Image (tube, rainbow, N blue to C red):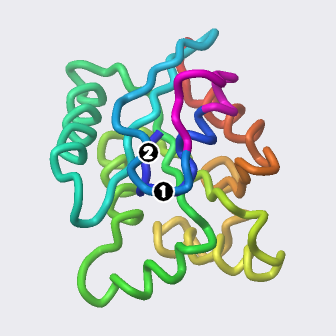
Amino acid sequence: MIGRSNVGKSSIFRLLSNRKKGVAVGKHAGTTQAFWHQELKNYILVDTPGLRFKQARAIQKKIISYVEKNASPNHRIIETAVLILDIKLFPELVKRWKDRQVPLDIELFHFLQEFDLNPIVACNKSDKLPQQALNDSLNMVSREFNLGPDWHAVPDIIIPCSAKTKKGINLIKEAILKRIRF
């Protein structure tokens, strides 16, 4: 599980792993400082600290190095990745950064694709948007990630969810299991 700080990675990790103790969640960025591993029936779920634009370069390098090492063809341990976005903020972040550089979420998606990780994009906080705004934001994700104009065409990649209401969590689990070789 990978993404920016404060998008709900640890909250979704807790829901996917049924792990209540030991995994810190908070309203402030930077709550998760370490990698959390949870062994499940068919795979190990890993929660990573959040990536931030300027701060925590050492943590960011550690996460990128972890993916590069464990997803390389010679040492393939990572089978898939769940990129978690805050769907409410995604359009604003893209507009803010697109003229200057590739926005972090888009860069992360393409990085995960380069390692053939067939990433899942969990669009968290979907409960905070009205249906039309949610649909527009999900379509924007699909376009910005070069997946096509309509997110409905890639329902196994783009999954609207809410850690708060637990909506979409089972769809994320199903998508993970489809990507794992037994």
Q: Which residue type carries mark 2?
A: Thr
Local SS, label 2 = loop
Local SS, label 1 = loop
Question: Quarter of the image holding residue 179?
Answer: top right
Whether 126 is drawn above or below 111: the answer is below
Q: At which x and y percent is residue 152?
A: 73, 64
Front residue of 31 and 19? 31
Q: Label 1, on which residue?
A: 28
Q: Quadrant of the C terminus?
A: top right
Q: At which x and y percent is residue 81?
A: 46, 39
Q: Which residue type carries mark 1?
A: His
Question: Quarter of the image holding residue 123?
Answer: bottom right
Left or right of 181 in this view: 78: left
Q: Main secondary structure of the magenta part?
A: loop
Q: Label 2, on which residue?
A: 31
Whether pointer 2 and pointer 1 mark residues with C-beta atoms closer than 8 Å, the reply is yes
Question: Quarter of the image holding residue 151?
Answer: bottom right
> Which portion, as a residue range, is magenta?
14-25
